[in-house]
Image (cartoon, rainbow, N blue to C red):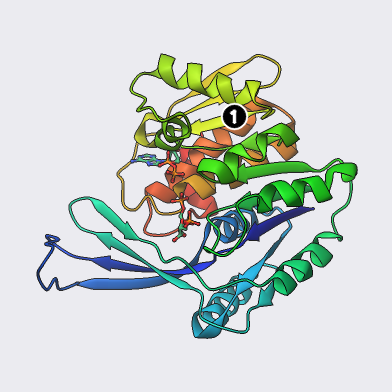
Amino acid sequence: MIYTVTFNPSLDYVMHVEDLMTHSINKSHKEEVYPGGKGINVSIVLHTLRIPNKAFGFVAGFSGKEIERSLSKLGVHHDFITLDNGFSRINVKLKAKGETDINGSGPQITPSDLRELFEKLNELKEGDYLVLAGSIPPNVPHDIYQTIIKELSSKNIFVIVDATKELLLNVLPYKPFLIKPNQEELGELFGVTLHTKEEVIAYGKKLLEKGAQNVLISRGSEGALLLTNDGQILDGTIPDGKLVSSVGAGDSMIAGFIAGYIKSHSFDTALKLSLATGSATAYSSWLATPDQIDDLLL
Ligand SMILES: Nc1ncnc2c1ncn2[C@@H]1O[C@H](COP(=O)(O)OP(=O)(O)O)[C@@H](O)[C@H]1O
Ligand SMILES: O=P(O)(O)OC[C@H]1O[C@](O)(COP(=O)(O)O)[C@@H](O)[C@@H]1O
């Protein structure tokens, strides 16, 4: 079974504007609302790929209710903890000539809410996959992902982490099965800006040295590099298509990777499905559909 945890779910409010101008009133000509947050997107795309999974996390207020309602409508299995105060984020995604995101900080999670999550995580069994993905609200300790992995360490679980900065660095000594920084986030971890593939590989190797078992570095339209614990460096390119919206492309990539790996236990197959799934999302207005993924599989 696969479980995802989203500490900071969102409603993604997508607005389409011709020319985005600051210090001015912009008019949108099309609006869409989708459930979002990294673990939730992974769950939705796993569901699309017919991989059974359950989404854990925290929701609050009217937006939290809408997130739950829309996931139930899609048939995505979820078991969220409802927070007493505040409301789940509404993240604004502005589509103009480029893409501009404004992501909220999220509602307060109390120590007793956290304990509830740990109780739910007791459900995990040996051989399960656990995806810890996305940012955490400001009052949650920055070692929370690490605490979760430590708590489950006796269970032999495949842990996948998609996070930035210390939230990610803190988990590396606990040997997560997979981490997925994008190229910019990889550079940020070491205070550098990465330009070439060689530089990306060199810094990716540093994450293997720090403990990650496998490192998938997504590179937007440049595809992705996978560095594995058995010394492989796989370079994946993207299928052709036209970018519509890259929101959720990284999360889709993780779902595709897990689905591919579970079915084949081959890193090569997992990388191919992850790229097709990531790009299928980038080439559509929301997350990838099964037909779009099939069409893009090289
Ligand atoms: N402009 C794009 N064109 C085609 N595929 C894309 C594009 N942007 C993202 N993707 C696909 O989604 C994956 C993840 O994208 P990326 O932007 O690197 O991740 P994140 O969303 O985590 O920042 C890429 O490896 C690729 O497969
Ligand atoms: O948890 P974070 O890092 O604040 O990001 C949340 C945002 O990321 C998304 O999950 C999309 O992520 P990706 O584009 O990286 O796949 C949105 O649905 C959500 O608004």
- Residue visible at 72% across and 43% down in the picture: 159
In this view, 254 is above or below 285:
above
- Residue visible at 67% across and 56% down in the picture: 4
* The quadrant where residue 206 appears: top right
Q: Secondary structure at mark 1?
A: strand
In this view, 150 is above or below 78:
above
Residue 56 shows up from this direction: yes
- Residue visible at 30% across and 73% down in the picture: 31
- Residue visible at 51% across and 85% down in the picture: 62
The residue nearer to you, when weighing 274 against 184, is: 184
The residue nearer to you, when weighing 117 against 38, is: 117
Q: Amino acid at mark 1?
A: Val
Residue 219: % across, % down:
41, 33
The residue nearer to you, when weighing 99 against 50, is: 99
* The quadrant where residue 5 appears: bottom right
Residue under pointer 1: 215
In this view, 118 is above or below 82:
above
Residue 14: % across, % down:
33, 67
Residue 181: % across, % down:
51, 37
Q: Label 1 crowding class (10 Å Cα cut-off): few <14, some 14-19, many 20+?
A: many
Mark 1 residue CB less than 8 A from any atom of ligand 1: no
Using residue 266 as the reference point, say whether residue 118 is left or right of it: right
Using residue 112 as the reference point, say whether residue 109 is left or right of it: left
Residue 27: % across, % down:
15, 73
- Splitting the image into four quadrants, where does ligand 1 fall? top left
What is the total number of numbered labels drawn onto the structure image? Answer: 1
